[in-house]
Image: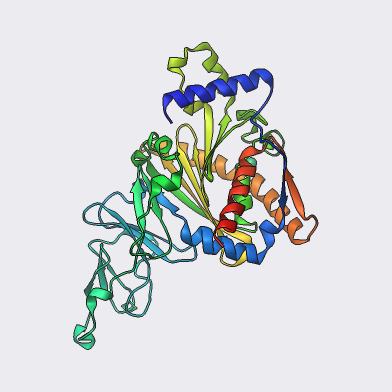
C-alpha cells in the first residue's frame, strides 16, 4: 500500500473515531439463506468460481527454487504447482498420462522430474514425458502428446495464481482480474515473505460463511471480548471495492498515536489489520508484522461443509527458538479467536439454515464488506450461467 493511500485511510479512520461513525453501505441488504444450503447453488459456485477464476495457490516463498512443488486438490481438481528449471512457476493437472495416478504428493522438492509412483513414468518440470520403464512396450505411442496437462498459471508480485481448467490458449491476465488491486498488493513485497506454517481445517459450515466472519468488526466487542476484541475498535472499519475483490481496514487502538505525528511519518500498517478478499475464495490479512492467507473451499459436494488452508507468512525465516515461539503464539491467538469463537458460531448458523429456521438474513449498513462479498458471489454465479 503506497503512502498516499495510508494517509488517506488514516485520516478516514481518525475522522470516524472523532464522529463515532464507521463506513456504511448505501442500504441494508437482505440475503437469501438458500445461498448457503442450496445444492444447486453450490454446483454453480463450483462450476464457475472454482473452475473458471484464478485461484490463489500460495506465495512465492513456498516455491523458492527449481523443483519445489506443492499439490492442491481442494478446488475439486488435482493440481501440482512447480518452479521449473528456468524459475518459471507452472501448474499441471496432477494426473499421470499413463493410467492417471497422481504424480506428486504433498509438497517438497521433486528434483528434476516427477516420477509417478505407479509405474515410474517420469515428467520433467515443464511437464514433458521423459522416461518410460520398459519403454519398448509403448513403441508407436506419441510421447509428445503424453505430457502432463498444463493449467494457466502466473506468479505476480509474490502471489501464485492458477485457473483449475486446462486451456492451452488462455493467457491468465491477472492484472485485469485484480481490477486495480494489483499495485497495492505489489507494494507489500510479498515475494520476500517466508512460509512459517500451514493448518488445514475441515468445518461444518458453508465456505462463504467462513469468509463472512472476516468481513465486519461489528461482532468484535461481543464474540471476541477476551481475545482480539480489546485490540481493535468495535464496529469501526473502512471498506473499498476493487471489482469483486475488496479491502476492509480494521484499525487497532494504537492508531490514535498517529495523531501526534506529522502525516509524512504515518505508517498505517502496524496500526491495522488489512483484510483483503481476493475473489472468490481467499482472505489475505496483512497483520502488521506478518501475513495470513485463508483459502476456503467447499468440501466436495457438501453444501454445509468446507475445508480451508490457513497459511502464515513471516518477514524473516524463524530460525531461532524464540522466533519460532513468537510466531507460534501468534498462530495460536489466530486459531483460538477464529476456531474457538467464529467457527462455532458459523456452524450454529449453518445448522439453523439447514433447519429452515429463516429464509433470509440481514446485513446492516455497518457491514459493507460483507454485503459486497456476498453480492459479488451472486453476481458472478448469475453472470456465469
Ligand atoms: S499411472 Fe503413472 S506410470 Fe502408470
Ligand atoms: Fe470474528
In the rendered view of the protein, which quadrant contains the N terminus?
Answer: top left
User: Which residue is more in the foreground, 4 or 66?
Assistant: 4
In the rendered view of the protein, which quadrant contains the C terminus?
Answer: bottom right
Residue pushed farthest right?
357
User: Which residue is more in the foreground, 73 or 161?
Assistant: 161
Is the residue 95 above or below the residue 315 in the image? below
Inspect this view and state whether residue 322 appears.
no
Q: Position of residue 59 (x, y in %)?
A: 39, 47
Residue 70, located in which quarter of the rendered image?
bottom left
User: Which residue is more in the foreground, 328 or 119?
Assistant: 119
Residue 260 horizontal side relative to residue 27, left or right: left
Who's the residue at 63% across and 43% down the image?
Answer: 370
Q: Quarter for ligand 2? A: top right
Q: Position of residue 260 (x, y in %)?
A: 52, 11
Is the residue 372 above or below the residue 24 in the image? below
Residue 213 horizontal side relative to residue 30, left or right: left
Residue pushed farthest bottom?
137
Q: Position of residue 13 (x, y in %)?
A: 58, 24
Inspect this view and state whether residue 133 appears.
yes
Q: Position of residue 349 (x, y in %)?
A: 72, 52
Amino acid at each position: 500500500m503506497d503512502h498516499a493511500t495510508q494517509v488517506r485511510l488514516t485520516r478516514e479512520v481518525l475522522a470516524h473515531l472523532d464522529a463515532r461513525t464507521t463506513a456504511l453501505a448505501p442500504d441494508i441488504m437482505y440475503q437469501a439463506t438458500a445461498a448457503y444450503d442450496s445444492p444447486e447453488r453450490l454446483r454453480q459456485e463450483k462450476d464457475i468460481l472454482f473452475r473458471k477464476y484464478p485461484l490463489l495457490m500460495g506465495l512465492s516463498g513456498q516455491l523458492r527454487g527449481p523443483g519445489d512443488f506443492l499439490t492442491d486438490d481442494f478446488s475439486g481438481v488435482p493440481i501440482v504447482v512447480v518452479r521449473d528449471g528456468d524459475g518459471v512457476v507452472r501448474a499441471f493437472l496432477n494426473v499421470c498420462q499413463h493410467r492417471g495416478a497422481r504424480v506428486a504428493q504433498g509438497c517438497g522438492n521433486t528434483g528434476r522430474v516427477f516420477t509417478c509412483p505407479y509405474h515410474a513414468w517420469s515428467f520433467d518440470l515443464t511437464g514433458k514425458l521423459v522416461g518410460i520403464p520398459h519403454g519398448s512396450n509403448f513403441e508407436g505411442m506419441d510421447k509428445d502428446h503424453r505430457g502432463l496437462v498444463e493449467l494457466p498459471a502466473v506468479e505476480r508480485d509474490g502471489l501464485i495464481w492458477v485457473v483449475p481448467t486446462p486451456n492451452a490458449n488462455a493467457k491468465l491476465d491477472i492484472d485485469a482480474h485484480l481490477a486495480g488491486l494489483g499495485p497495492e498488493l505489489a507494494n507489500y513485497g510479498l515475494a520476500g515473505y517466508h512460509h512459517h506454517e500451514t493448518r488445514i481445517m475441515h468445518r461444518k459450515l458453508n465456505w462463504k460463511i467462513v469468509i463472512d466472519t472476516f468481513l465486519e468488526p461489528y461482532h468484535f466487542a461481543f464474540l471476541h471480548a477476551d481475545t482480539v476484541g480489546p485490540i481493535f475498535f468495535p464496529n469501526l472499519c473502512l471498506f473499498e471495492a476493487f471489482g469483486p475483490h475488496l479491502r476492509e481496514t480494521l484499525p487497532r487502538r494504537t492508531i490514535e498515536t498517529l495523531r501526534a505525528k506529522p502525516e509524512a511519518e504515518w505508517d498505517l500498517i502496524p496500526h491495522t489489520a488489512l483484510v483483503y478478499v481476493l475473489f472468490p475464495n481467499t482472505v489475505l490479512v496483512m497483520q502488521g508484522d506478518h501475513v495470513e492467507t485463508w483459502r476456503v473451499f467447499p468440501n466436495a459436494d457438501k453444501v454445509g461443509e468446507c475445508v480451508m488452508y490457513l497459511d502464515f507468512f513471516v518477514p524473516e525465516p524463524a530460525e531461532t527458538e524464540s522466533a519460532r515461539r513468537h510466531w507460534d503464539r501468534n498462530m495460536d491467538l489466530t486459531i483460538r479467536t477464529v476456531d474457538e469463537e467464529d467457527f462455532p458460531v458459523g456452524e450454529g448458523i449453518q445448522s439453523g439454515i439447514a433447519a429452515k429456521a429463516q429464509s433470509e438474513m440481514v446485513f446492516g449498513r455497518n457491514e459493507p464488506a460483507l454485503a459486497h462479498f456476498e453480492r459479488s458471489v451472486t453476481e458472478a454465479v448469475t453472470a456465469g450461467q
